[in-house]
Image (spheres, rainbow, N blue to C red):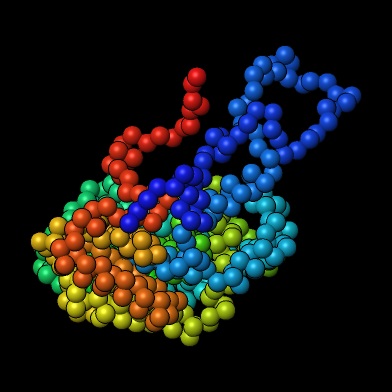
Amino acid sequence: MTFATHTGNRGLVLEEKLIFEQGQPDRTGVDLPEPKGTKSRLGGLDRESDVGLPGLSEPQVVRHFTRLSQKNFGIDSGFFPLGSCTMKHNPRLNEKVARLPGLADLHPMQPESTVQGALELIDTCAHWLLVLTGMPAVSMSPAAGAQGELCGMMAIRAALDARGENRRRVLVPESAHGTNPATAAACGFTVDSIPATEDGRVDLAAFEAKLGDDVAGIMLTNPNTCGLFERDVRKIADLVHAAGGYFYCDGANFNAIVGRVRPADLGIDAMHINLHKTFSTPHGGGGPGSGPVVFSEALAPYAPIPYVVRNENGFHLVETADENDGMKPFGRLKGFHGQMGMFIRALTYMKSHGADGLRQASGDAVLNANYLLARLKEKLSVAFPGYCMHEALFDDSFLKDTGVSTLDLAKAIIDEGFHPMTMYFPLVVHGALLIEPTETETKESIDQFCDAVLSLVAKAESGDAEFFKNAPYLTPRRRLDETAAARKPVLRWQPETA
């Protein structure tokens, strides 16, 4: 039974008004005297009306933002099974190191002589990435995975231009991340989609048929967006190279194979690495992100500036093209050199785990995903046969004739205390449910999630569709009109008029 309370609160889940709604004129948490002996420097442009900020006491401010923080669900709160996004635990050791004096207070415009330690840290982090991928060069600049893609494809464009070849067609599997075709188009390429086989991999025959002297390369995710390893990846690389193109790999899912497969051995020419997915730096909320790109020998000369080198005077940040010996950088991607805080966290993660620990982490991620797959496949319909890598993918055929949709099931999962899995992605799977437990979840936490999902599936099969249509029941806000919220968002608070 549901009921409404007078306050709008639900037990200790408190109804929270906007901070503007709580404010009162002439109320303040501070009491400052009028400054004496000073003159206005506004030149007659003094404000004639109030700023319009809310007037609040200190306890009101503290309670407001504390309550907002309690409404957030994050990896520190519970199991966060978003597939493809890899919302994973961020070890507190990383945070402690990132806050050390000398690291936390760095400024990007300090003289180079005063940041030798920071440059060495970037160089060391780059070294780890090169060893783990087997590649000869890396750009640390890109601020996110999408910008990493842009970096790699711009290097490919620069290499083709240097060869005097007007290749402008890029092959992209239909299960690719949505940023892949967008990035290719942004770099002036046309996108040619490659279909998948019934087992969720690239259709090799269709791929070969699309090769030609206008093909700039392929953008392939491996493991792919369906959570599967591309078995023909080496042959794909050989074929695209024989046709004169380059192999860009979307490295978003490197966390499934790090320490076990070196991308260089797969014939890859460029690959971005999401430090927030593979090496535990924070993820979500629009940042902070970091997407270094590793390059093969063929593309290394075209990597962007700046980059760190070591000479007899210590570490040096190469920032202009005329400093380069045989290098042909396509330019620079951002104002400063990457995301320093993310480099610190990623290097701390790598060094604290060591090579063997990183190998175990990827193995545990795959083990957890396959355990989850084994537990759920008796009731949920698996999208593709066989084992998965780091994430398990289901379609919605198990809900056929129940009157319950993927969205309905996801809303009901919220009431069970779990953030829903990724829904309706990848688009090649109807009503997709993409679930990634990551390597840090215990068997008990995965079992609890699986038990909750299976209980809801049983409820759907029992014919209680109405229950799902009204879920969630226990959240501060019930089901929203998501279409209207997206198309007609209310982004600004307006005071009530008398």
Image position, residue 238 (x, y; %):
23, 71
Taking the spot 57% from the left edge, 79% from the top edge, the residue there is 352
Residue 55, relative to residue 295: is it above or below?
above
Image position, residue 21 (x, y; %):
54, 34
Image position, residue 113 (x, y; %):
72, 58
* Viewer-nearest residue: 414 or 15: 15
Taking the spot 63% from the left edge, 44% from the top edge, the residue there is 61
459 left or right of 137?
left
Residue 172, relative to residue 39: is it above or below?
below
Query: Can see residue 133?
Result: yes
63 left or right of 355?
right
* Viewer-nearest residue: 346 or 299: 346
Query: Can see residue 431?
Result: no
Q: Which quadrant is home to the N terminus?
A: bottom left
Residue 466, relative to residue 30: is it above or below?
below
Residue 47, relative to residue 156: is it above or below?
above
429 left or right of 270?
left
